[in-house]
Amino acid sequence: MPVRLVFLGKLADCADASEHTVAAPLDWAGLLAHLPAELAVAAADPKVRVAVNGVLLVDKRALAAGAGDEVALLPPVSGG
Amino acid sequence: MRDVRLLESAFSPGAEIERFAADHSGAGGIVSFTGQVRAADGCEALELSHYAPLTLPGMEALADAALARWPLDGLLIRHRVGLMLPGEPIVLVAAAARHRRDAFLAADFAMDHLKSDAWFWKREKRAGQWHWIEPREADRADLLRWQ
């Protein structure tokens, strides 16, 4: 099973679809390499957080996603 | 005690408040706040997106924090996601308490956190074009009031 990527907020606009899949296992360098250049730059912004299966990573560079995991890229929230 | 929901379609704040009041008839008072889409500034529509694994759990944790901080009889939060038109309600917070000040503070606390610290992404349609709304410094500053 691949890793599923989910893009939120304006990152979903940069991605063609709001979800992508990529082969497991996936680390941060692998994720950036998979993304189109514009999206990789946006994802690397320190304000963009990353969650794996709904759990926020303290340091997204420590990403280690396995088969079937869902990795979400979360830009700063704009509030309700 | 805690009644927190994310809603995919339009809701009636009046009906929610009436039911909440009936469920908390022992409370001395109920404070409620309704936020709605501004029918101004050329806003034609608003769209809120969320991320299910984080958004509702985060709102529930927020409600728990308010319940732990003030002696409340109950706390209700309703928040829309999806497409909304000017005048439509976006958010409702209602706090029931024995004493009014606790209810005012809890509702204010919940709104400040929903506005700047909840997992929502918002875009507005103006002149036919969608624009993502960036976080506002004023909303972040409001959060500091509670530290």
Image (spheres, rainbow, N blue to C red):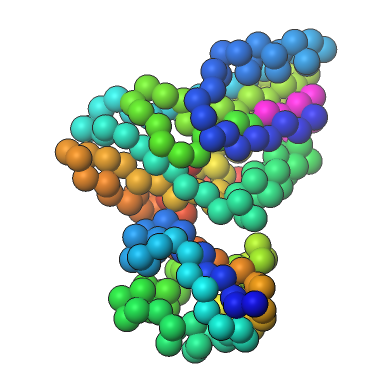
Looking at the image, residue A77 sits to the left or right of residue B102; the answer is left
On screen, A61 above or below A17?
below
The answer to whether any part of residue B105 appears in the image is no
Quadrant hosting residue B73 = top right
Tell which residue pokes out farthest to the left in this image: B127
Left or right relative to B75: residue A40: left
The overriding secondary structure of the stretch rendered in magenta is strand
- Taking the spot 76% from the left edge, 37% from the top edge, the residue there is B67
The quadrant where residue B45 appears: top left
Pick the front one: B3 or A64: A64
Q: Is residue A7 magenta?
A: no
Tell me if residue B80 comes above or below residue B147 in the rendering.
Answer: above
Q: Residue B105 in the image: state x and y as whole percent.
A: 63, 31
Q: Nearer the viewer, residue B111 or B102?
A: B111
In terms of depth relative to the viewer, which is nearer, B128 or B21? B128
Return the x and y of residue B14 as percentages of the image width and height: 56, 13
The residue under the point 72% across, 31% down is B3
Give the percent coordinates (x, y) of residue A20: 48, 70
Picture residue at 41% right of the left edge, 36% below the top:
B83
Query: Which residue lies at the image location 56% right of the left edge and 70% below the top edge?
Result: A4
Which region shows up in magenta? B70-76
Between B93 and A35, the one nearer to me in the picture: A35
Across the whole image, how many numbered discs are drawn on residues? 0
Q: Is residue A52 left or right of residue A37?
A: right
Name the quadrant of the N terminus of chain B.
top right
Where in the figure is residue A2, as x and y percent of width and height? Answer: 60, 77
Tell whether A42 sits left or right of B19.
left
Q: Looking at the image, is A74 positioned above or below residue B56? A: below
